Amino acid sequence: MVLPPVYATREDVMHALDVKPTAYNSAQIDRALQSASRGVEALCHRRFYPEAATRYFDWPSSQYRPSWRLWLDDNELISITTLTSGGTTIAASDYFLEPNRTGPPYNRLEIDLDSNAAYGGGDTHQRDITITGLWGYRNDETLVADVDEAMTATETDLDVTTAHSIGVGSVLRIGTERLIVTGKTMKNTFVTLPGAMTVSQADVTMTGVSGGFSIGETLLIDSERMLIVDKTDTALTVKRAWDGTVLAAHSLGASIYAARTLTVQRGALGTTAATMSSGDDIYRWDPPGPVRDLVIAEALTSLLQERSGYARTAGSGENEREATGRGLADLRARVYTSHGRKARTRAV
């Protein structure tokens, strides 16, 4: 079963909880993220992720509307590839995507009244209008890495040059193909430790190691994970015992691994799997910031409540009260105000 995308990553939640990745808690966090993401969609009455698809609309339908306007309602559009009605293609110059001042997302299509185009003309009103395009809220993307090794259209392990900005759950685009990250594992960087490291939280500098690493990247040396928090031209500064691992001593010449191999779902969200070349750009789709924050908060609350048997309390003795999460309620209200799809009023 292919699950829809989530609006925050497994790493977002793990870092907030400071837990060590295991098969058990990874599955638990993924489930919480799915639940939180679907809950935010229900709250806001919209889906935020981009999906390439062809959708059909009746014309005329039971909705009251002018003959030149098609309301899309919850089928929000980011962009159109082709528009046909009654089997006739309508040119991009003959229609408008609205609202033009704030979209995308676009919630209606209007025929340019200065053109000869029109809706209708099919043998029946059912599915008279066909729209192929990119559906969703926004398609905001960030360039985050490059492909590190060529891939066929069937491979599912993607090696990248850096993955500090990519997590399990990220939606990526390489060329015209979208991929969903379902796993993340360590890859040998073929760089070795230039000096021994002691069992000390104060021993945080790797002198002689810098090139090819990024701030925010997770390293693995022996069985200890470390987070890169700063770098210069000649050294890395790390946070030791990261991801719940145990502080340990490391010898000169120990291999340095980095989380740069991604397990991905190919041809996701209506796209087709394609071959990739080393050096191809990798773009990450970015959900709206408040939506991401709310999904993280909802997932954290769900996990903490589950661990306490849904009996979390604050205070003690006579002052003990159930933890109600007022901050979460405020965040929900702010997200609905800023990103909720409001009801459209129309005559009947």
Image (spheres, rainbow, N blue to C red):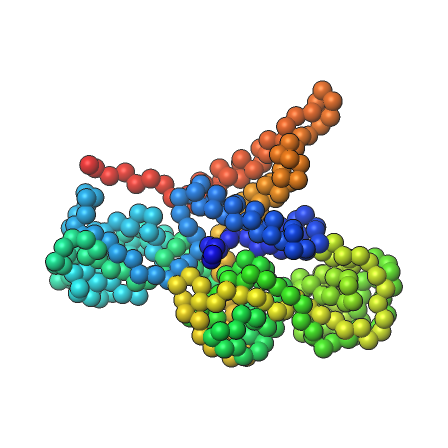
Work out whether residue 51 or residue 311 is closer to the camera in this orientation and state it: 311
- Looking at the image, residue 258 sits to the left or right of residue 146; the answer is right
Name the quarter where the C terminus is drawn.
Answer: top left
Task: Identify which residue is drawn at 74% across, 76% down.
Answer: 191
Instruction: Name the residue furthest front.
Output: 1
Numbered circles on residues, count? 0
| Image quadrant in which you'd find residue 310 | top right
Would you say residue 297 is visible in this rendering? no
Percent of width and height locating residue 192: 77, 75
Q: Is residue 274 above or below residue 137?
A: below
Work out whether residue 107 or residue 252 is closer to the camera in this orientation and state it: 252
Q: Is residue 63 above or below residue 104?
A: above
Percent of width and height locating residue 43: 44, 41
Task: Identify which residue is drawn at 31% across, 61% down.
Answer: 54
| Image quadrant in which you'd find residue 194 | bottom right
Percent of width and height locating residue 298: 56, 42
Task: Identify which residue is drawn at 74% across, 71% down.
Answer: 256
Would you say residue 74 is visible in this rendering? yes
- Looking at the image, residue 217 sits to the left or right of residue 252; the answer is left
| Image quadrant in which you'd find residue 82 | bottom left
Work out whether residue 26 or residue 140 is closer to the camera in this orientation and state it: 26
Q: Is residue 77 above or below residue 310?
A: below
- Looking at the image, residue 126 sits to the left or right of residue 314; the answer is left
Percent of width and height locating residue 273: 44, 71
Task: Identify which residue is drawn at 16% across, 53% down.
Answer: 125
Q: Is residue 340 above or below residue 150?
A: above
